[in-house]
Image (cartoon, coloured by chain):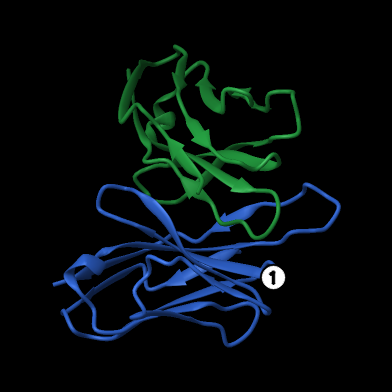
Amino acid sequence: DTAVSQTPKYLVTQMGNDKSIKCEQNLGHDTMYWYKQDSKKFLKIMFSYNNKELIINETVPNRFSPKSPDKAHLNLHINSLELGDSAVYFCASSQRVAGTSNEKLFFGSGTQLSVL
Amino acid sequence: AQTVTQSQPEMSVQEAETVTLSCTYDTSESDYYLFWYKQPPSRQMILVIRQEAYKQQNATENRFSVNFQKAAKSFSLKISDSQLGDAAMYFCAYTPRAGSYQLTFGKGTKLSVIP
């Protein structure tokens, strides 16, 4: 069973369109994330979200918005797509247990977004 | 702000030999985690090894070990008995212990393994 699953794996779209990438985790984790990997392979956090708090990286344009219908899902909506949005987007999840160091970050397999 | 620096964009190693990938970081936190992730061409992010800053003992996972120098803010990865399947991008990453797992990544080192 896949722990963190993203769909679609590949997304090709025209500039100006609105698109969504879905993410689901079956681990019961409290916190989910979106990371962006650019064409130079540089990975950068975009958002972290749990049921209490959304933390947004200040460099992320407001055309990007995470939406969480429930604890197991964190979808990424992108409005008015631009050429520079082409990248691989990774979803991830984690669970911190107070008093232990038994914590791990689980990544999805990534969504390659190409904006034409 | 935390930064992670990998000064070697590319490295190569002969099969069965040992290679060391370098990583330095900058933080004002005293308690944090450091990681090495492997990303093969399949794109999957695979955790190789994790180090907790409060532990003086260097982490090891089979053929992978780290040299963690907290005072120098250095965290290198040693791969022993290199195998063809080790060829990948390797990313060093950092997160403070407090709060959520917002990793700060280095720019990566592309490792090639020569048969």
Q: Position of residue B97 (x, y in %)?
A: 69, 49
Q: Position of residue A11 (x, y in %)?
A: 28, 73
- Report which colour depicts chain A: blue
Q: In the structure shown, which secondary structural element does the residue marked by tag 1 occupy?
A: loop
B37 relative to B113, above or below:
below
Dot 1 crowding, Cα within 10 Å, few <14, some 14–19, many 20+: some
A46 relative to A51, above or below:
above
Instruction: Give the residue number, with chain letter if any, for mark 1.
Output: A30
Q: Position of residue A98 (x, y in %)?
A: 83, 57
B72 relative to A75, above or below:
above
A14 vs B33, left or right, is: left
Q: Amino acid at mark 1?
A: Asp
* Residue at image coords 36%, 67%: A9
* Residue at image coords 28%, 86%: A18
Instruction: Residue lying at the far right in this picture: please name it.
Output: A99
* Residue at image coords 30%, 28%: B10
B69 vs B44, left or right, is: right
Q: Quadrant of the C terminus of chain B?
A: top left
* Residue at image coords 32%, 20%: B12
Chain in green colour? B
Q: Nearer the viewer, residue A69 or B114?
A: A69
Q: Image quarter for residue A32?
A: bottom right
